[in-house]
Amino acid sequence: MRSFDNYPKSVKKALRYIKQDAHLAQLENLEKVFLQSINLRKKALESEKTACKLHTGLPTSKN
């Protein structure tokens, strides 16, 4: 796992905000947004990985 110092500045700022300033309602909304974004990114990466596997598994055409 990456060290906190290796993450982009925007991620560090968001985490600092969550730890120090966010209220309960804000935390609940942020949690939903982050989880949705993470799940969308995971799906995109998984479909990209599947497409790559399918592409490499196809026989090459000879001209």
Image (tube, rainbow, N blue to C red):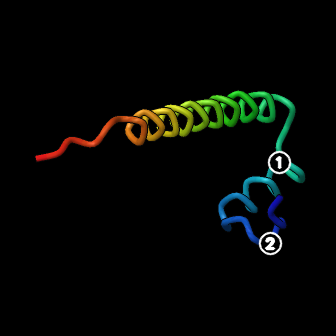
**Amino acid beneath label 1:** Ile
State the residue position of label 2: 5
Image coordinates of residue 3 in percent, x first then y, are 84, 67
Residue found 83% across the figure and 65% down from its top = 4
The residue at the far left in this view is 63
* 54 on left or right of 34: left
* Residue at image coords 75%, 70%: 6
Q: Nearer the viewer, residue 2 or 5?
A: 2
Instruction: Examine the rendered structure and indicate whether residue 15 appears above or below residue 26.
Output: below
Name which residue lies at 73% across and 61% down.
13
Q: Is residue 7 left or right of residue 4?
A: left
**Which of the 4 image quarters holds residue 38?**
top right
Residue drawn at point x = 41 percent, y = 42 percent? 56
- Viewer-closest of 11 and 40: 40
Relative depth, front residue between 28 and 11:
11
Residue 18 - label: 1
